[in-house]
Image (cartoon, grey):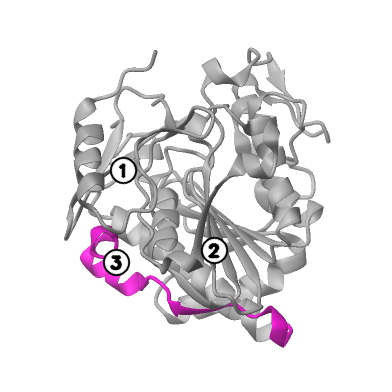
Amino acid sequence: MRKYSLLPILCTLLLVAASPILADPVPGVSRGGATILHDVRPSQPAERVRIAWLSEWFDGLFGTPADTRVFIIDSGAPGATVFVAGGTHANEIAGILTAVLLAERALPSVGRLIVIPDLNTSASTYTESTTMPSWIRVDTTRGPRFFKYGARFTDPVHQGEPDPERYVHPKGGNALEGVEARNLNRAYPGAPDGNLTQKLAWAVMTLLRSECVDIAFDLHEAGVESRLANMIVANPKNLDTAALAVINLEMEGLSMKLEPSSETFHGLSHREWGDGTDAYAFLIETPNPAQSSKNGNPTEDPKYPLALRVATHLASIGAILDAWNDGCPPDKRIAFSYYPDWHTVKDQGVGALLN
């Protein structure tokens, strides 16, 4: 059995009890034994928000450690459906907190927003490195909140089979280390009868198709030395949209690189989501010092603070949606009466906008 510090859990439970806007109790166990580790507190009008579970789209996840909550915020006005996922890799905390902010605060006025803050909950249940924290504390005006800092891969205890000696995607390509069989971002489009990671990938693809998602974002982080740091990766069919967004971000003072999905590297979200569904698919990377060779601080690094990384995710999503609106049919627009202000996050911290 995994051991966690009880202090963050107890503090979160006390805050939950005192919070009138919390829509779902956390942390704890719900729906077939699925574990809730991330504290998400939607404040939108109740009639606008539905909290679902990913197993509702694929019942093969029901009762597994990979089932996870899905927050659907509907404007009630026809328009685009936008999907945002944080926590594909549960140690990439800026993506998780960006998704939490959107689930808590974003209010579409046209179209729908679907958010999964903790996509691979199995990966959230443990931490791979003893040098990394198990929990991240974020101070807010309502008190401290705690978010699980997990691992890159599905927990081997949950996978249902041992890692292979080498992992090769079913579509072919280079052989990778066996542990990559537990990397959700190498598993798409997944398989309904596969291991837990493949089932999770299959469930995401099923949701994207069933909900007719128009624009899909997968939020990630990379080491500060990585070429991927501060990069948008786009499926080739929506590369023009990403290029316009990068230009507009530059005008806002944020420099983001742009790269198209590889034609030969299979299993990644931006490639398989875009090829296998109608969605325009994007992956956004920010630089996490904790993923660098020196294992820096994931929240308090002076050059790459958590607030700046979350702000970069928010700004990049916003710029891509603006670019989408410039070229889409009138009935496929997405608009917000409130969208978390990335300038506020950058200048005042993530807690300034968390509920």
| Circle 1: residue type | Pro
What residue range appears in magenta? 329-355
**Gap between marks 1 and 3 measured at Cα:** 16 Å
53 or 103, nearer to the observer: 53
Residue 229 drawn above or below residue 13: below
Q: Compute the Cα span from label 2 to label 1.
A: 22 Å
Viewer-nearest residue: 75 or 106? 75
Residue 336 drawn at (x, y percent): 49, 78
Q: Is residue 271 magenta?
A: no
What label sits on residue 179 in the rendered view?
A: none
Q: Residues within 10 Å of mark 2 (few under 14, many from 20)?
A: some
In front of the other: 18 or 142: 18
- Can see residue 186? yes
- Circle 1 Cα neighbour tier, 10 Å, few/some/many (<14 / 14–19 / ≥20): many
Q: Quadrant of the N terminus?
A: top left
Q: Which residue is mark 3?
A: 346
In the rendered image, which residue does mark 2 sit on?
257
User: Of marks 2 and 1, which one's residue comes earlier in the chain?
Assistant: 2
Q: Residue at x 36, y 64 (%)?
A: 43
Res 246 visible? no
- Name the side, left or right, on which 316 lies relative to 20: right
Q: Nearer the viewer, mark 2 or mark 1?
A: 1
Pick whichever of labels 2 and 3 is earlier in the sequence: 2
Q: Position of residue 294 (x, y in %)?
A: 33, 34
In percent of width and height, residue 99 lies at 45, 55
Contact? badges 2 and 3 (CB < 8 Å): no
Instruction: State how far apart marks 2 and 3 are (Cα).
Output: 20 Å
Q: Amino acid at mark 2?
A: Lys
Q: Residue at x 39, y 60 (%)?
A: 104
Q: Secondary structure at mark 2?
A: strand
Name the residue carrying label 1.
298
